[in-house]
């Protein structure tokens, strides 16, 4: 603990004599999370009748990590799982009387680890988890008799059947999947995907954001999540929680340095995308937004084949003909793989002069609308150029959160309203995992 900061007596007590330290012999939820500082924390939970009967932790971190782990297990004990899952960094710091800025991340690590342990219990837990080495005879994740995962196909091995069931068990808990695509790089696809996910979360929806741009993951930077690392709980990958309504997964969280290059071929990329769908503890989601790299190659093809239904593509373009020509092929790709198109977004559609208010068509205007009419797909709207979009992205602050009243912010809001209205016209049934 920092020597030049006057810690409260309660913080010193928990650091020197931590409560609840050590693994539990039997537990219902467990998680291990490594924070951006490199400290790792484990949390174990025993749960009875929906309440945490006992919580324990270990950490390889500093005295501040010990104090935070001790306090968060004390705060969690006796609470319902949902209440414990909502304990925040500020709650831990407040209970300990405050920490200096350089060690406040220890409280965030404790809160993230407790949340992951709660989600491990919610998503199955140790006592409910079946032996995955044994081939299941039927899927018990839903009551739908017609579900394709109920029976093994004639051309499937037992191992392939078990893998497919594990994938379907995840996907049946996700209401709708939006694949954000573009035929051309540099059109702002990742920016649209990030702000679409944040907008849905701000609307109260449960949202997952999956970045499958293996070679150029942008989502961690756009959302200010660089340096965050995924957790592991009971064999599942735990996504990074940006808010209570938004969970994020990206290959970027697995790289040790921003200089690292991912040099993979198609089969390996397919396996990783499948793992992101099958092994990530997404929980129950209303929407999964997938940021795919540009073009119609391995990643878009893999995700289109794996996500099942209901799913649809949100196609991003800029107005000029060079981009339109490639995006036209992207719409054709969607038709070829039987992926419905939710609509086309025209990004960088003109610039409003901040001085005189004149509208300047930097990259022309109207190309996205013309393409939507040509290809007979919905047109979702146009987002104008706004320097604040660039500034927000560089700062890791979601644009729609910081600039909702700007012209571009209102455009994003209208696009989300159009998408949600389209879903209301075509209702989506979400199958929730049945409790044992």
Image: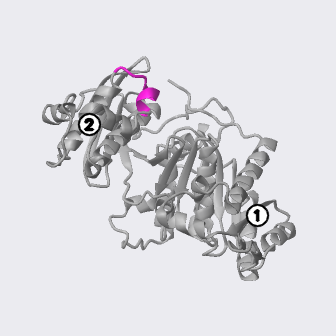
Helix, strand or loop under label 1? helix
- Nearer to us in this view, 149 or 224: 224
- Nearer to us in this view, 112 or 130: 112
Q: Report whether 111 appears left or right of 191.
A: left
Q: Disc 1 or 2, which lies upstream in sequence? A: 2
Q: Residues within 10 Å of mark 2 (few under 14, many from 20)?
A: many
Residue at the image point whose x is 35% and y is 20% from the top: 78
Q: Give residue 335's mark.
A: 1
**209 in relation to 31, above or below:** below
Residue at the image point whose x is 69% and y is 74% from the top: 355
**125 in relation to 62, above or below:** above
Q: Residue 388 placed where, x, y %? A: 59, 66
Q: Which residue is mark 2?
A: 69
> Which quadrant holds residue 202?
top right
Alpha carbon distance from label 1 to label 2: 51 Å
Examine the rendering and report whether any part of residue 287 can be seen: no
Range of the magenta residues?
Answer: 78-85
Residue at the image point whose x is 20% and y is 32% from the top: 21
Q: Residue 168 placed where, x, y %? A: 57, 43
Q: Residue 391 placed where, x, y %? A: 53, 67
């Amino acid at each position: 603990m920092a020597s030049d900061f006057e810690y409260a007596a309660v913080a010193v007590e928990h650091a020197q004599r931590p409560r609840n330290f050590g693994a539990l012999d039997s537990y219902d939820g467990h998680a291990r999370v490594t924070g951006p500082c490199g400290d790792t924390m484990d949390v174990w939970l025993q749960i009875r009748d929906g309440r945490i009967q006992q919580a324990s932790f270990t950490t390889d971190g500093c005295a501040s990590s010990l104090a935070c782990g001790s306090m968060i297990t004390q705060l969690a004990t006796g609470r319902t799982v949902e209440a414990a899952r909502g304990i925040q960094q500020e709650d831990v710091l407040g209970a300990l009387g405050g920490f200096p800025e350089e060690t406040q991340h220890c409280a965030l690590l404790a809160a993230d680890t407790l949340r992951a342990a709660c989600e491990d219990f919610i998503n199955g837990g140790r006592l409910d988890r079946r032996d995955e080495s044994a081939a299941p005879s039927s899927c018990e994740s839903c009551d739908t008799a017609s579900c394709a995962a109920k029976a093994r196909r004639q051309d499937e091995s037992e191992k392939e059947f078990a893998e497919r069931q594990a994938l379907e068990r995840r996907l049946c808990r996700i209401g709708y999947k939006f694949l954000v695509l573009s035929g051309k790089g540099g059109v702002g696809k990742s920016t649209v995907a990030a702000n679409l996910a944040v907008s849905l979360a701000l609307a109260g929806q449960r949202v997952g954001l999956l970045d499958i741009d293996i070679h150029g993951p942008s989502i961690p930077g756009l959302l200010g999540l660089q340096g965050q690392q995924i957790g592991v709980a009971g064999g599942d990958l735990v996504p990074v929680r940006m808010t209570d309504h938004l969970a994020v997964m990206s290959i970027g969280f697995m790289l040790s340095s921003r200089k690292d290059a991912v040099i993979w071929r198609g089969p390996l990329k397919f396996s990783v995308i499948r793992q992101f769908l099958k092994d990530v503890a997404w929980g129950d989601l209303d929407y999964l937004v997938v940021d795919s790299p540009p073009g119609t190659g391995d990643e878009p093809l893999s995700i289109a084949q794996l996500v099942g239904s209901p799913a649809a593509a949100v196609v991003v373009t800029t107005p000029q003909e060079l981009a339109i020509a490639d995006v036209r092929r992207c719409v054709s790709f969607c038709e070829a793989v039987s992926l419905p198109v939710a609509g086309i977004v025209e990004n960088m559609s003109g610039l409003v002069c901040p001085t005189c208010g004149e509208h300047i068509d930097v990259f022309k205007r109207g190309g996205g609308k013309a393409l939507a009419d040509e290809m007979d797909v919905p047109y979702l709207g146009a987002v104008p150029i706004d320097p604040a979009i660039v500034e927000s992205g560089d700062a890791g602050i979601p644009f729609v959160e910081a600039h909702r009243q700007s012209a571009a912010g209102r455009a994003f809001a209208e696009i989300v309203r159009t998408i949600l209205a389209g879903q209301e016209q075509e209702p989506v049934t979400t199958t929730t995992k049945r409790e044992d």
